[in-house]
Image (cartoon, rainbow, N blue to C red):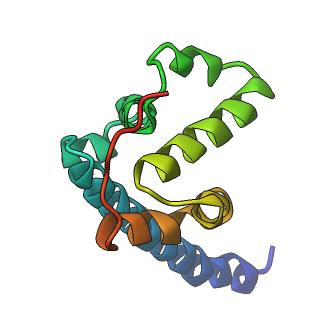
């Protein structure tokens, strides 16, 4: 086996790992600020499953919806409805919903650090 090929993958893998870590930090920062703005604890953004429960609460949806997220295909619809609820409660419209669906990292930062204010709308 040619050792040249085996060692050339190490720098590429290291670069990918660094990129993933940077993206993870950006996601946590955006969610932390978004949660804080909604009156929730920012640390919840780093706790798996609990951060989803907090997102459901921010969206104003019933907490039992977390169970729907475990059902294939249904979870896509429920995720979109949660995203719509989050955008609505931050006083934003369709553009923000589409942004949260297709570019979530950027739009979480926009909601968290932007001028949008959280006001829970009961349905």
Residue at 56% in and 83% down: 11
Relative side of 60 to 8, left or right: left
Residue 30 found in image quarter: bottom left
Residue at 76% in and 25% down: 74
Instruction: Give coordinates of residue 59: x percent, y percent.
Output: 45, 37
Instruction: Give coordinates of residue 50: x percent, y percent.
Output: 35, 30
Given residues 54 and 96, the one toward you in this image is: 96
Given residues 13 and 116, the one toward you in this image is: 116
Residue at 66% in and 42% down: 80
Q: Is residue 53 visible to us here?
A: yes
Residue 2 found in image quarter: bottom right
Q: Is residue 36 placed above or below 99 in the rendered structure?
A: above
Relative side of 22 to 78, left or right: left
What is the quadrant of the N terminus in the image? bottom right
Disc tally is: 0
Given residues 100 and 89, the one toward you in this image is: 89
Relative side of 84 to 22, left or right: right
Instruction: Give coordinates of residue 52: x percent, y percent.
Output: 44, 34
Q: Is residue 20 visible to us here?
A: no
Instruction: Give coordinates of residue 60: x percent, y percent.
Output: 43, 31
Q: Is residue 55 placed above or below 53 in the rendered structure?
A: below
Q: Is residue 118 placed above or below 48 in the rendered structure?
A: below
Residue at 59% in and 45% down: 84
Relative side of 94 to 110, left or right: right
């Amino acid at each position: 086996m040619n050792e040249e090929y085996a060692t050339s993958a190490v720098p590429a893998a290291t670069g990918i790992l660094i990129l993933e870590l940077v993206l993870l930090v950006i996601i946590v920062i955006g969610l932390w600020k978004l949660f804080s703005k909604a009156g929730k604890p920012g640390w919840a953004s780093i706790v798996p499953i609990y951060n989803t429960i907090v997102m459901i609460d921010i969206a104003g949806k019933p907490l039992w919806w977390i169970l729907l997220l475990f059902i294939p295909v249904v979870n896509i619809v429920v995720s979109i409805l949660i995203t719509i609820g989050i955008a609505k409660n931050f006083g934003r419209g369709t553009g923000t919903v589409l942004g949260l669906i297709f570019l979530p990292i950027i739009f979480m930062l926009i909601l968290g650090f932007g001028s949008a204010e959280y006001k829970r709308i009961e349905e």
